[in-house]
Amino acid sequence: MIRIKGIEKSYGNKRVLKEVDLEINKGDLVALIGKNGAGKTTLIDIICKLKKQDQGMVEYSFNEKDIYKYIGVQTQSSEFDERFKVKEVIELWKDIYGNLCGNVEELIEILDLTEVMNQKIKSLSGGQKQKLSILISLIHQPKLLILDELTTGLDAFSRAEIQKLIKKLNKEQNRTILMVSHYMDEVETICNKVFVLKDGKIFDSGSPRDLIEKYDCKNLQEFAEKQLA
């Protein structure tokens, strides 16, 4: 699906990414983890062509000219015009993607947005805005879904429901999913592979269980505390 080779990126004299190599295959449910400043967001921006790398390349299994037909992106800082109603934002994105859209009404129900459709964005809670962001990222049925801090701001029940949805999309629809997350319990629960970004490089990779056993940890949280400090 995506192959990243020798990606380098600097801001001034600071090297943020240093010869990053990784591969995401079709049907993977992958996590990218690392502490703040490790380069995770920069790498995602390069994948999405929001930033240009200094060196290296990203190879796609689809025509990169049509990248946003194939990729859906949910970002932690998604912002919508607060004067709009929820239903107006959704209709706008439906108009943009046209016949690529799937069953939007089902997504609205799954994400528990039915009762806020007539509310303006400014009246939504942080969790409701996060759910709207997730819906927008899914609206055109992307082959590759990129999720940045998927469940930030959500209560425990909503987190569990969103995690179920992501696993369902991966298993039943064979969607390829790349997650950036600081919630190690979430990564351990739903991901089949983890890339560990440390000091701008891929420190290690493998399944959550592989990493836990390799570094003799009780869980992925302990691995992160020991290896990413």
Image (tube, rainbow, N blue to C red):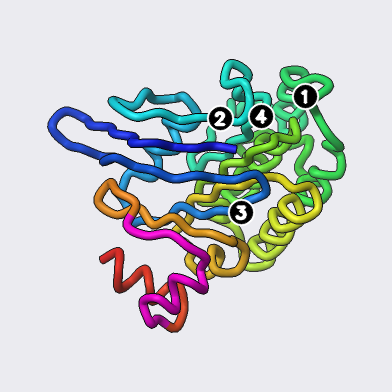
Disc on res. 60: 2
- Give how far across and how far down residue 131 sits, in percent: 66, 46
Q: Do residues under tags 2 and 1 come within 8 Å of each other at their CB atoms?
A: no
Q: Do residues under tags 4 and 2 come within 8 Å of each other at their CB atoms?
A: yes
Disc on res. 94: 1
Q: Is 161 positioned to the left or the right of 9 in the image? A: right
Disc 1 packing (10 Å; few <14; some 14–19; many ≥20): some
Q: At x 70% / y 34%, what residue is drawn?
A: 142
- Mark 1 to mark 4 CA distance (whole Å): 15 Å
Q: To which quarter of the image does residue 214 belong?
A: bottom left
Disc 3 packing (10 Å; few <14; some 14–19; many ≥20): many
Q: Nearer the viewer, mark 2 or mark 3?
A: 2
Q: Nearer the viewer, residue 142 or 114?
A: 142
Q: Nearer the viewer, mark 4 or mark 2?
A: 2
- Confirm whether residue 124 shows in the render: no
Q: In what quadrant of the picture does the C terminus appear?
A: bottom left
Q: To which quarter of the image does residue 107 belong?
A: top right
- Whether 151 is among the magenta residues is no
Label 3's element?
A: strand
Label 1's element?
A: helix
Disc on res. 174: none
Instruction: Tell me the residue that label 4 is attached to.
Output: 70
Q: Nearer the viewer, mark 1 or mark 3?
A: 3
Q: Earlier in the sequence, mark 2 or mark 1?
A: 2
- Mark 2 to mark 1 CA distance (whole Å): 25 Å
Q: Earlier in the sequence, mark 1 or mark 4?
A: 4
Q: Is 86 positioned to the left or the right of 206 in the image? A: right
For badge 4, the amino acid type reads: Tyr
Label 2's element?
A: strand
- Give how far across and how far down residue 224 sits, in percent: 37, 68
For badge 1, the amino acid type reads: Lys
Q: Is 153 positioned to the left or the right of 96 in the image? A: left
